């Protein structure tokens, strides 16, 4: 009993330490307004055929990532559309430079039965990032129950979602569609809105296109979507679920994708001021991970972190984190 009480008290004060870095204001930035968003997702002609099948039109190109953010066990489809005659250009190994007019699309869904994807899916939301006048504008579209359309919603909404997981277990989650402020909070970099996932290192993986295996960056170059550079010189962010990587690589990759967007010197100010730096490329001695591993483990285990985007413990991801922290 005393041990249980100690753990609860420990977790409580851990939450106070980390959660206050994300909860009580300062640092919220206004959403850019250089784009007037359409009221319906269909205004963007993203999908063809039966819309719920998520088959993109030829203007939109698939993006896959090595590691991704956990969001209540949802599946994600990522797409990009570039203005005609433009290309993505390399800056460093991180987020490349996207031309004005770029549309980044991220759709969240669940397979009705993950063991049998052919049974269909339940699509929850589609998020858009559109770059105009060198500013990234954010919007979220919530899908209707008929799965025939999605409507602009900047205020957020909760949805109860049920599905059967890969092990045949029935699951239900209260899925939270983010508000506009939620989006700009996580997506801020030096007080401006920016993409998070599609770094060159996170896109530097083998994918299948036209029934052929190819490096994704090479595919973008071949398709005229990206400028030419030697993609073999770009490191790959590890897939944190891939056991062929070391536990240190996997643990740091998990922090990169699930924590570093806020917890870095240029992120959400209240988080940045705490001094944690979970970016994969940051030397371990500068992250505070070794000295604060108990607190870090506690807030993830309690489900309080990540603060925005999920309200369900990532059991498999947390197992990676535990193994990594225990190795330090």
Image (cartoon, rainbow, N blue to C red):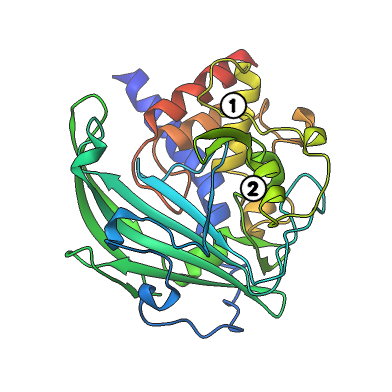
- Residue drawn at (56%, 36%), measured in percent from left and top? 207
The percent coordinates of residue 166 (x first, y second) are: 27, 28
On screen, 227 above or below 229? below
Image quarter (top left, top right, bottom left or bottom right) of the N terminus? top left
The nearer-to-camera label among 1 and 2 is 1
Quarter location, residue 324? top right
Left or right for 230, reference 207: right
Left or right for 131, reference 53: right
Q: Which of the numbered marks, if any, corresponds to residue 263?
A: 2
Q: Which residue matches tag 1?
A: 251
What is the spatial separation of the Cα atoms under label 1 and label 2, in whole angstroms?
15 Å
The percent coordinates of residue 281 (x first, y second) are: 76, 36
Q: Secondary structure at mark 2?
A: loop
On screen, 20 above or below 85? above
On screen, 158 above or below 13? below
- Residue drawn at (54%, 43%), measured in percent from left and top? 64
Mark 2 packing: few (<14 Cα in 10 Å), some, or many (20+)? Answer: many
- Residue drawn at (45%, 42%), measured in percent from left and top? 70
On screen, 61 above or below 242? below
Q: Which of the numbered marks, if any, corresponds to residue 12?
A: none
Camera-nearest residue between 6 and 83: 83
Mark 1 packing: few (<14 Cα in 10 Å), some, or many (20+)? Answer: many
Image quarter (top left, top right, bottom left or bottom right) of the C terminus? top right
Camera-nearest residue between 142 and 53: 53
The percent coordinates of residue 179 (x first, y second) are: 42, 68
**Sequence-first tag of 1 and 2:** 1
The percent coordinates of residue 78 (x first, y second) are: 49, 53
């Amino acid at each position: 009993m005393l041990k249980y009480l100690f753990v609860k008290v420990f977790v409580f004060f851990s939450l106070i330490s980390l959660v206050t870095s994300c909860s009580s204001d300062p640092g919220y930035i206004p959403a850019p307004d250089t784009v007037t968003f359409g009221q319906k997702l269909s205004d963007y002609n993203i999908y063809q055929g039966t819309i719920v099948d998520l088959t993109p039109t030829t203007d939109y190109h698939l993006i896959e990532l090595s590691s991704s953010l956990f969001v209540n066990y949802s599946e994600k489809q990522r797409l990009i559309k570039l203005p005609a005659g433009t290309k993505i250009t390399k800056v460093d190994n991180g987020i490349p430079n996207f031309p004005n007019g770029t549309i980044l699309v991220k759709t969240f869904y669940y397979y009705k039965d993950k063991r049998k994807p052919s049974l269909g899916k339940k699509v929850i939301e589609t998020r858009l990032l559109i770059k105009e006048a060198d500013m990234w504008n954010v919007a979220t579209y919530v899908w209707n129950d008929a799965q025939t359309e999605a409507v602009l919603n900047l205020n957020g909404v909760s949805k109860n979602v049920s599905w059967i997981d890969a092990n045949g277990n029935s699951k239900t989650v209260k899925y939270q569609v983010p508000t506009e402020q939620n989006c700009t909070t996580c997506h801020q970099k030096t007080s401006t809105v920016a993409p998070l996932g599609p770094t060159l290192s996170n896109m530097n993986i083998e994918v299948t296109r036209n029934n052929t295996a190819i490096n994704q960056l090479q595919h973008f170059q071949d398709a005229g979507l990206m400028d030419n550079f030697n993609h073999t010189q770009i490191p790959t962010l590890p897939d944190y679920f891939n056991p062929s990587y070391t536990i240190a690589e996997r643990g740091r990759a998990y922090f990169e994708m699930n924590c570093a967007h806020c917890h870095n010197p240029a992120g959400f100010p209240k988080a940045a001021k705490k001094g944690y730096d979970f970016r994969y490329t940051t030397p371990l001695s500068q992250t505070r991970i070794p000295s604060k591993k108990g607190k870090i483990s506690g807030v993830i285990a309690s489900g309080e972190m990540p603060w925005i985007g999920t309200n369900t413990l990532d059991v498999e991801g947390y197992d990676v984190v535990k193994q990594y922290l225990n190795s330090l």
